[in-house]
Image: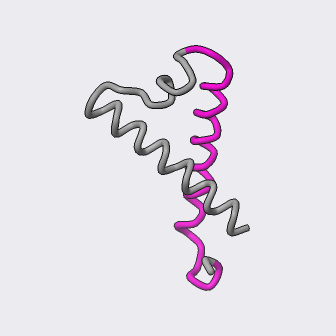
Amino acid sequence: MDIIRKLCLILAIVGALNWGLIGLFEFNLVEFLVGSEGMLRSIIYILVGLGGLVSISYLFMSDNNNK
């Protein structure tokens, strides 16, 4: 479970950094790396979104479950 937690947090961080770059510099890192069109870009966005959703559940876990 710890691997899933870390992966979801990494995905959420990637999404946050990408949005920060878009807001500050109008630079989309995902589109820069994989292109502006295509299935791979959509898959990355979906995985980042799922990672963020799963990470929300960690806010409501007790400290005993977070170890």
Of residues 56 and 7, the one drawn nearer to the viewer in this rendering: 7
Residues rendered magenta in the picture:
37-65
Residue shown at the point (31%, 25%) measured from the top left: 26
Q: Position of residue 33 (x, y in %)?
A: 52, 27
Residue shown at the point (47%, 50%) measured from the top left: 13
Above or below, 15 against 64 in this view is above
Please state, as top left, top right, bottom left or bottom right, where the N terminus lies in the image.
bottom right
Q: Position of residue 17 (x, y in %)?
A: 40, 43
Above or below, 53 against 20 in this view is below
Residue shown at the point (30%, 33%) measured from the top left: 23
Picture quarter containing residue 21?
top left
Picture quarter containing residue 48?
top right
Seen as rendered, the residue at the extreme right is 1
Residue shown at the point (58%, 41%) measured from the top left: 49
Q: Position of residue 54 (x, y in %)?
A: 63, 55
Dominant SS of magenta comes to helix
Above or below, 53 against 40 in this view is below
Please state, as top left, top right, bottom left or bottom right, where the C terminus lies in the image.
bottom right
Of residues 35 and 42, the one drawn nearer to the viewer in this rendering: 35
Q: Is residue 19 magenta?
A: no
Q: Is residue 47 magenta?
A: yes
Does residue 38 appear to the left or right of 21 in the view shown? right
Does residue 67 appear to the left or right of 29 in the view shown? right
User: How does the figure colour the protein chain or chains?
Assistant: one colour
Does residue 47 appear to the left or right of 35 in the view shown? right
Seen as rendered, the residue at the extreme left is 24
Seen as rendered, the residue at the extreme front is 33
